[in-house]
Amino acid sequence: MTDNSTAGPPVSENPLLPGPFPADPLDSGPFPAAGYAGDPAVRAEWDGRYADRTQLWSGRPNGALVAETAGLTPGRVLDVGCGEGADAVWLAREGWDVTALEVSGVALHRAAGHARDAGVKIRWVHAALTEAALPPGSFDLVSAQYPALLRTPGAAAERALLAAVAPGGTLLLVHHAGMETREAHDSGFDPADYVWPSTVAALLDDAWVVEADERRPRVAPDGGAGAHHTDDLVLRARRLR
């Protein structure tokens, strides 16, 4: 979705992004393309998916996120692929300092509305993970819940996830079990195109300790796309240095 105004919305500088973003996206409509860092085709694809429905996800935090953060002390968190903001809002309510990243401006507009309604403040980053220019080693938790991250020969997305975690911090990557082994089919989905917990785990060295790397029954919110998936792949790793 594009911004149809001529002068553009009021902007403030986001220290995590090379460029401006709306000071109040609820006043100015969906996040404008001019503030987006990433492939325009990817943004357009996801804007279309969100625009097709008034609500794509359940509106409740993901069960694995709730369970895996229960013992963590709130600090700075990066929510990768925040969608309509349910996880980001929940984390903020739990005392986390939240930065939420998303390629879809339509989704970010909705997420910002939910945050306003909840009375919490969240930094919104309209960018692809690999283009977001995030300060390295800055987050006590990097959470990626069912992300659609594309693989590259240099493992750019996997390395960006790891690079964002601060020493002593935690990476939590959760995905739908079984999808990574599916055959490519006519819809265009090929699991080889995407990042999975196994591809990230393969990059972990002795600077990391793996605290969970397993398949488990999914604690799924009722409703929303993806509710039919019954099992999760959960990778939780702590960065030592």
Image (cartoon, helix red, strand yellow):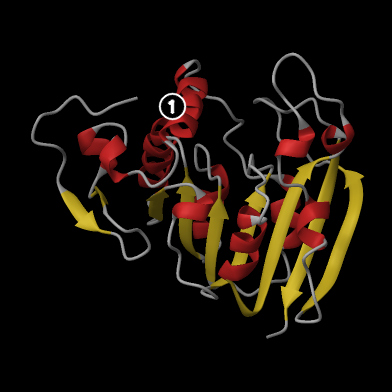
Residue drawn where x is 58% and y is 48% of the image: 87
Residue 66 in the image: x percent, y percent? 70, 54
Quadrant of res 238? bottom right
Residue drawn where x is 54% and y is 64% of the image: 77
Residue 179 in the image: x percent, y percent? 83, 33
Residue drawn where x is 66% and y is 25% of the image: 225
How packed mark 1 is, by other alpha carbons closer than 10 Å (few <14, some 14-19, many 20 or more), is: some
Residue 154 in the image: x percent, y percent? 66, 56
Tag 1 residue: 44
Quadrant of res 224? top right
Above or below residue 165? Residue 105 is above
Q: Amino acid at mark 1?
A: Ala
Residue that lies at the very extreme toward the bottom in this rendered image = 241
Residue drawn where x is 8% and y is 35% of the image: 7
Above or below residue 101? Residue 140 is below
Residue that lies at the very extreme toward the left in this rendered image = 7
Residue 97 in the image: x percent, y percent? 47, 66
- Left or right: where does residue 96 sit relative to residue 36? right
Closer to us: 155 or 115: 155
The C terminus sits in image quarter: bottom right
The N terminus sits in image quarter: top left
